Image (cartoon, rainbow, N blue to C red):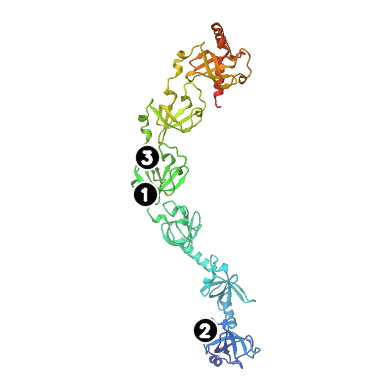
Amino acid sequence: MLTMEEALKQSTAPIRFAAGEIVAGRIIEVRPKEALVDIGYKSEGTVPAAEFEDIKTVKVGDEVDVLIEKLEDKEGMVVLSKEKAEFKKNWERILTICNEGGRIAGKVKSIVKGGLIVNIGVEAFLPSSQIDVMTPKNLAQFVGNTYDFKVVKINQERQNIVLSRRELIEAERTERRQKLLAEMTPGDIRKGTVKNITDFGAFIDLNGIDGLLHITDMSWGRIAHPSDVLKVGQDIDVVVLDVNKEKERVSLGLKQKMANPWDQIETKFPVGAKVKGKVVNLVPYGAFVELEPGVEGLIHVTELSWTKRVAKPGDMLKAGQEIEAIVLGINREEQKISLGIRQLEANPWDQAQEKYPTGTRVKGQIRNLTSYGAFIELEEGLDGMIHVSDISWTRKINHPSEVFKKGDEVEAVVLEVDKANQRIAVGVKQLATDPWETIDQLYKVGDLVTGNVTKLASFGAFVGLQHEIDGLVHISQISEERVDKIKNVLKPGQEVTARVIKIDRSDRRIGLSIKAANYSAEQLKAEQVALDALKPGEDLVALQHAFDAADEAAKPE
């Protein structure tokens, strides 16, 4: 900048002192709030301290160009402005250099509503949305820094300029992206920064283009969420897996920097080997066990126990639990390993046939009751089933709860061991002799018997006899008089005397007649003949049909 003396020597025209003119001046005094400037006029002028970058650095004798705002204020002083002088000098230069779309350097001066004020020779406005690719939350970090900007708008009438730093950054990124796409090939290892994390992976900034690192390519092992491995802002080295130049997409990998643990899997974990691992996930059908980073095996729910029917793996295992298991199978192509826990122990069913041969007497507690039978615990993990048909030789049992309850100590006989289906059939009635094998010695047609009514039905009444045998009195055999409703004549528990009028060994049935209790031998014989001669459809229903009705009634009560 020319000194005032040099300017006076070079100028052939006199200095024009008028409002709006730019003149050279010299600092003659520095005050806290202003600087006193001599411009060669009859009186000195003042420049506000705020118009200097730092008033503390201003010294007496410094030369400065100023714009005359007023030749004389109320105190007779000239009102000067350093900023307006710079603005006027720079405006034409800026218009020439920075047509809309031009590029210029500037220093961020301050924060204002909606953006920043940038000094590019004159003050210009930088909207927040144009500061960076992502609108920053902290604008203070930019104050005092110098950047390049693109001029996006100039309003000459209002003398304001709008800038954009974002457009320059995006243009540079586009240029770098095209260059990267042209030179990048699969297998390259690139440095990048984690830009964003999603549920399915992470986007990595490769300094010009973003690549996707999918969660399945982060580790050979199981990852619950990408945030377990990466953090936003983290610098990492990644492997380029694929480059799609048309769609400008890059697929990246992290685990590919390490050897695939499945390559030597048969050597590390041979079939039959005992291995250790940690339960990492429980699902309805089994448990996944981590044998080493990147290698997991599945214990199917059926491989948890030889004897227990495990409803869900959580009944036996917990996530994070350290366990031992046996390798059952390996599929390297599908990266699957089958494991088993029950194989750590001997299969009790292998010795079941030798330990419980047919005819063996066993004891145990009733563990469970079902509609078809009762389960008795023979030993830990081995149950025997007593079918309802094997509870009694003589009584018709509709449900095992009629005889047993949970916790009862029961003795039984082993009937069959089915190793393939892991079932042991046992029976209670087999502990005693079948009374029907000697029924002729116990009862004969014509015998007079006494018993208690055990059950009533619409067709007759069952009477409990000795030897745990039930006899049936048909409704037609109760009285000489017609009986409409059997409950009007007999009651459960009532003791009755009756005559045996029919024995059917093949169907294991005894027919009784209360009305025949006082019959003579001739009357009894006649009654027997009458009963044997009855045919279906006749008014007097045969005892056989009563038994049939009893069978039907005995079906699911």
Q: Which residue is mark 1?
A: 263
Residue 85: quadrant of the picture: bottom right
Choose mark 2 or mark 3, whichever is in front: 3
Q: Amino acid at mark 1?
A: Asp
Q: Amino acid at mark 2?
A: Lys
Res. 242 visible in picture? no
Q: Position of residue 182 (x, y in %)?
A: 46, 61
- In three-dimensional space, the C-alpha distance between marks 3 and 1, rounded to whole angstroms, equals 26 Å
Mark 2, other Cα within 10 Å: few <14 / some 14–19 / many ≥20: few
Q: Amino acid at mark 3?
A: Gln
Disc 1 or 2, which lies upstream in sequence? Answer: 2
* Residue placed most toward the observer, 182 or 15: 15
Res. 305 visible in picture? yes
Mark 3, other Cα within 10 Å: few <14 / some 14–19 / many ≥20: some
Q: Please identify the residue farthest to the front as the structure is shown.
A: 495
* Residue placed most toward the observer, 119 or 318: 318
Q: Residue at x 36, y 49 (%)?
A: 263
- In three-dimensional space, the C-alpha distance between marks 2 and 3, rounded to whole angstroms, equals 87 Å
Up the image or down, 346 lies above or below 269; here it is above
- Residue 56: which numbered mark, if any? 2
Judged left or right of residue 155, residue 289 is left
Q: Position of residue 18 (x, y in %)?
A: 64, 88
Q: Secondary structure at mark 2?
A: helix
Judged left or right of residue 539, residue 185 is left
Up the image or down, 273 lies above or below 127; here it is above
- Residue 343: which numbered mark, if any? 3
